[in-house]
Image: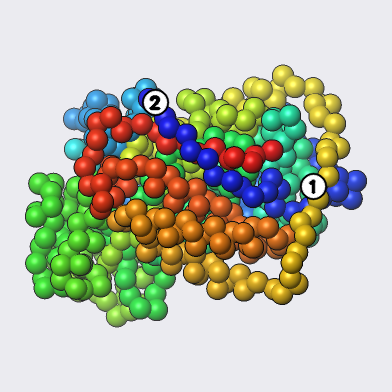
Amino acid sequence: MQSTTIEVPTLRRYLVPFEPKRIPHLFADVLILGAGIAGTRAALAVDPSLRTVLVTKDHASQSNSSWAQGGIAGVLDPVDEFANHVQDTMQAGKGMCQQDVVELVVREAPERIRELINFGTEFDQIGGEIALTLEGGHSHPRVAHALGDATGKEVMRAMHERVHAAENIDVWQETFTIDLLTRNGECMGALVWNKYHGRTFVWAKQTILCTGGAGALYRETTNPQIATADGHALAFRAGCEVRDMEFMQFHPTVLYIAGSSRHLITEAVRGEGAHLVDGNGYRFMGDYSEQGELAPRDVVSQAITQQMARTSHPCVYLDLSPIEPEKIRRRFPHIGKVCAEFGLDITRDRVPVRPGAHYMIGGVTTDTDGRTSVPGLWAAGEVTSTGLHGANRLASNSLLEGVVFGLRCGQNASAAALEQPDNFCAPPITSAPGLPHNSDEALDLTDIRNSLRSLMWRNVGISRVEHELVAARQQMDFWANYVCRRDLNNPAGWELQNMMLISRVMASAALARTESRGVHLRSDFPQTLAESATHITVAASDAG
């Protein structure tokens, strides 16, 4: 598939100044950044003879993977076929999926799911067989789930137990990855920080990037607040190719209650029979798609947004009354508990919902082996653009992508590391100087972060138009000129600088795609153009 390249300046190569002689150095064979499903699967695939360091900026249990509710998709039913799953994925992706990647992932799905069972994952069962549910965009029930509506939590429990039991894997929790270390264009490891040791150079023969998504760039999101696009940003600063950054998927149904965090209401609720109604009680999805509530996520999110505008109402509602109350309690215990905290009984009350930023489709470009454009750097999971999702991710294909490419990255990075001698690198590299400050006045990081997230929601959200995207870029450039040119000294500051960089990349990519496709809706260019089914690649104009 062809691509068009645009450039965005990073404003700096490294976020912090450093002097190699004054920072501790640690050596690993394989360094893995991120402890979600992709990172843990990669770690478990590394040869046991190799020292592996797994870094996560929060506790290992905190990741988008752990928050995943719906499940993992795979052809497990004899009446289903690989061709059906491939076709559903391709149709959802609106002409942007890479067919060989889709075929690869779909065909590996059953084996990867069985592997998760072997790791100890307990999927829900009916009659001794894995229970399968239907979700939007799928032609057959093929989504395996666990704990009713807490699949990610159960999958990650089993995988983390394996990781912590592995003698060759060191897990560094509450450790922030500041930047990738490169020399002559090759990745040599990363500069990390934690409150116990301060800054540390972690030199690695091979590095795997699995840092997750970017949902926290938006005011309304299903993601934990740690999803600040750190991996996208540090890869971009290191000169890594990223693409499809205009494609942020918005989940249609996010609990919308004043005072509540924006809890995801899994698509499986609609798969089991729930209806969407507007503020007047009207079931509206039939007006937008023949598939009704089970249309792909981009269609449902855009329909909800339009219906909210038509009715001048701040949300729509999920009506679960078509589902038997006992089935609701059994199938959706987590959602029922969250709603009960706000006085809602999901067996009888309508649940207020609206869309929220959910899954970052764009990211670091990889091949089918998980290799990036920077030698020595591999990537898997939500931080990547593999070609699987196209312009709109099919429900429950994300955990699947994480285990498929996490395994591949772990195997391939391991094989490469085994061929390298232990004296693979001479650590001293050029010092990174600090930046001059024009003012010693402290920045209100929280205020800038909230302002950025609100701007992204208004101007780079579900519906986009040129003058709002231009205004967003101008405002972001203004903020970045003083935020990103400062030497900040804590994770909150580094997160903000990463968010600022990737927001500028996303807005620039959205400006460049002058059509509507999948999750990217341009109200000034509403048509989908056959000749525009190409990638938009973003390069750092000042990468070092």
Does label 2 or label 1 sit earlier along the sequence? 2
Observer-nearest of 10 and 92: 10
Question: Which quarter of the rendering shows the N terminus?
Answer: top left
The correct choice, above or below, for 80 with respect to 305 in the image is above
Label 2 neighbour load within 10 Å: few <14, some 14-19, many 20+: few
According to the picture, the residue beneath numbered tag 1 turns out to be: 432
Amino acid beneath label 2? Gln
According to the picture, the residue beneath numbered tag 2 turns out to be: 2
Q: Residue furthest top?
A: 419
- Left or right of 517 in this view: 151: right
- Left or right of 187 in this view: 498: left
Q: Quadrant of residue 491?
A: bottom right
Give how far across and how far down residue 181 sits, in percent. Answer: 72, 40
Which secondary structure lies at badge 2? loop
Q: Quadrant of residue 429?
A: top right
**How many numbered badges does the structure rendering display?**
2
Which secondary structure lies at badge 1? loop
Answer whether residue 90 is visible to the viewer in this image.
Answer: no
Q: CA distance from mark 2 to mark 1?
A: 36 Å
Label 1 neighbour load within 10 Å: few <14, some 14-19, many 20+: some
- Left or right of 64 in this view: 327: left
Amino acid beneath label 1? Ala
Question: Which quarter of the rendering shows the C terminus?
Answer: top right
At 62% from the left and 30% from the top, the residue drawn is 374
At 66% from the left and 22% from the top, the residue drawn is 416
At 36% from the left and 31% from the top, the residue drawn is 534
- Left or right of 107 in this view: 282: left
Give how far across and how far down residue 3 sits, in percent. Answer: 42, 29
Give how far across and how far down residue 262 sits, in percent. Answer: 38, 67
Observer-nearest of 432 and 224: 432
Observer-nearest of 466 and 199: 466
